[in-house]
Image (cartoon, rainbow, N blue to C red):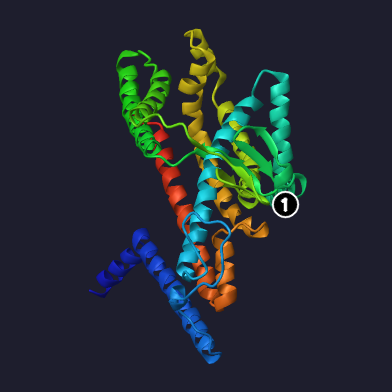
Amino acid sequence: MMKSINQKNESIWTNATFRATIYQIAAVSIVGLTAYYLFTNTTANLAKQSIATGFGFLSREASFEIGESMIKFSSSDTYLKALIVGALNTIKVSFIGIVLTVALGIVVGIARLSKNWLVSKIAASYIELLQDIPVLLQLFFWYTVFNNILPSPRQALIPFKGMVLCNRGVYFGIPADHPAFTYMGYAFLFACILIFFINRWAKKRQELTGQIFPIFTVSSALITLFPLAAWLVMGSPTEMNMPTLKGFNFEGGYNVSPEFGSLLLGLVLYTSAFVAEIVRAGIQSIAKGQREAAESLGLKPIFIMNLVILPQALRVIIPPLTSQLLNLTKNSSLAVAIGYPDFVSTSNTTISQTGQAIEGVALIMIMYLTISLLTSFFMNWYNDKMALVER
């Protein structure tokens, strides 16, 4: 009987799955106890020093202004709304930066492989120059260009009607407020949804019949005609809201502030240099025989790149591209160095006024963790979609 019990115990501990479970439970317990100790110890020390804890400060009046906001904000609003303004500013520069970075990186990466010697060398110089200069220095450079090199509003540069360059930022003429433009936006969104389903149908049709559907031509037509039709139906408004010099500054139009412009330029140019190298490496990873086979079928260069090379290269490009997009989002926290009111900047102001350093830093960590996880989730989904399907 004793021998059978010992054999049973030995069989349990020699089971790799059982041992792994026990080790994981032990590791989680140690981490949990450590976190509990740190939390209780920190809380006790803060209580001894009469330092308030918790997130009750979020409902108090902020008492500071924010220079740039996507929503209405004043000093009488709460700290919570101030942090929301900072979060929206961070999301704004990150989203626009990611879109521009991917587009510019693809163009420069393909140009790096151009058979034209001049185009190839310009792309290579772009990559080497911007990769080797720290992103913070690039932010300072563009901020200096906006504030010290561009002229004052009274001597502003006007490259063409509706665009103004000065040390207060870049001003663009925009359509005046009219319901027609809202419906044009709805029409554009509807066209994009329709193009998505047409694209799926065209791919299935090509797989079954081998016939190529002119998706680019049809997409261009839909994106143009739908908003145009909405504009015509709503009365064809042509009034523009143009920037006009009044006093010491321009009013009207849309303004890109020096802080936002400097941050966006620095992040996009720096990160796109790395994305370009990723695109170049991904394209070069495809065997030359793939291109030669496509050329032997009589495909044009643009179709070879879009239908043969890039779909295969994306499987190599997407994983490192995800890391660069995450780096862009995290590097946006450097905005505090040039005065752009992002989430870190508004959080620092909140911490200095309330003394809630632990809560403020925790909110910053949660904010960037959330954005990074959402970006990773989307890129991982896209990577799985582009993965090879075994048949």
Q: Position of residue 128 (x, y in %)?
A: 72, 37
Of the pair 171 and 346, the residue shown nearer to us: 171
Q: Which residue is mark 1?
A: 140
At a point 49% along the width and 13% down the height, the residue shown is 294
Q: Which quadrant would residue 129 be assigned to in this image? A: top right
Q: Furthest-front residue in view?
A: 247
Is label 1 in a helix, a strand or a loop? helix
Of the pair 37 and 155, the residue shown nearer to us: 155
At a point 38% along the width and 34% down the height, the residue shown is 184
Q: Position of residue 31 (x, y in %)?
A: 46, 72
At a point 67% along the width and 56% down the height, the residue shown is 338
Q: Is residue 235 above or below residue 97?
A: above
Labels in figure, total: 1
Of the pair 281 and 184, the residue shown nearer to us: 184
Q: Furthest-right residue in view?
A: 149
- Do we see residue 390 in this rendering? no
